[in-house]
Image: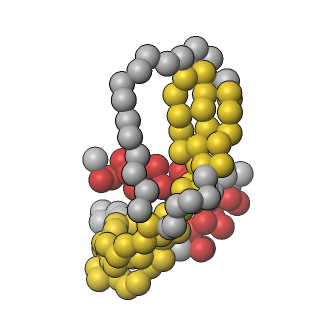
Amino acid sequence: KLVALARKRKVNYYTEPRNHTRVAVLGKSARVPLHKKGGTLKGGMPMVVYGGVNVANRMYGYNRRSSIDSKLLEKVELNKFNPVEYTTFAVWIEVPENMQKAITATGAHFSDGALHAIEHALCS
C-alpha cells in the first residue's frame, strides 16, 4: 500500500497530471432530441443521451511547470499506479454522421473536443 505525505510549502511551480481516461458506454437509458422547436435540422437531429458508462483512468505521470511563464520544467514518469476503474452514469450528445458531414461540407470543422465543451456547458 502506498502512502502520500503532503506539507505546505511555497514553490515557484505548479503541477499538471498526465493521464489517460477511457469511457465505455454500457447502455443507453434515455434519449431526447437536443432541439425541440419543430422540424428537423439538415443531416439529422442531435440527441441528448443518458446511460451507464465504465470509466478507467490511468495516471502515468505529471508535468512540473513554472508559475511565472508556464514553461515546462520537468516531466515526471509514474509507473506505480494501477488504473482506477468504476461504473457510473453519464450524459452525452450524439450527433448523427449525416449532420457531421453537413457541418464539414460548409467548410466548418467538426470537433469532438468542441462537442465535449458543449456537453459541459449544458450540465452547468
User: Seen in the image, is 96 located left or right of residue 8?
Assistant: right
Expressed as whole percent of the image width and height from the top left, the position of residue 84 reads 44, 67
> Residue 35 placed where, x, y %?
35, 63
Residue 38 vs residue 71, the one in the foreground: 71
Total tally of numbered discs in the picture: 0
Closer to us: 78 or 84: 78
- Colour scheme of the rendered structure: secondary structure
Q: Position of residue 70 (x, y in %)?
A: 61, 23
Name the residue: 60% across, 66% down.
100
Above or below, 84 relative to 121: below
Question: Which quarter of the rendered picture does the N terminus lie within?
Answer: bottom left
User: Image point 38% across, 35% down: which residue?
Assistant: 6
Looking at this view, is 119 or 39 the one in front? 119
Specify the quadrant of the image occupied by residue 97: bottom right
Residue at 53 percent of width and 34 percent of height: 15
Judge left or right: residue 24 versus residue 76. Answer: left
**Residue 32 is at least partly visible in this image:** yes
Tell me: 88 left or right of 118: left
- Report x, y in % for residue 111: 61, 55
Q: Is residue 47 visible?
A: no
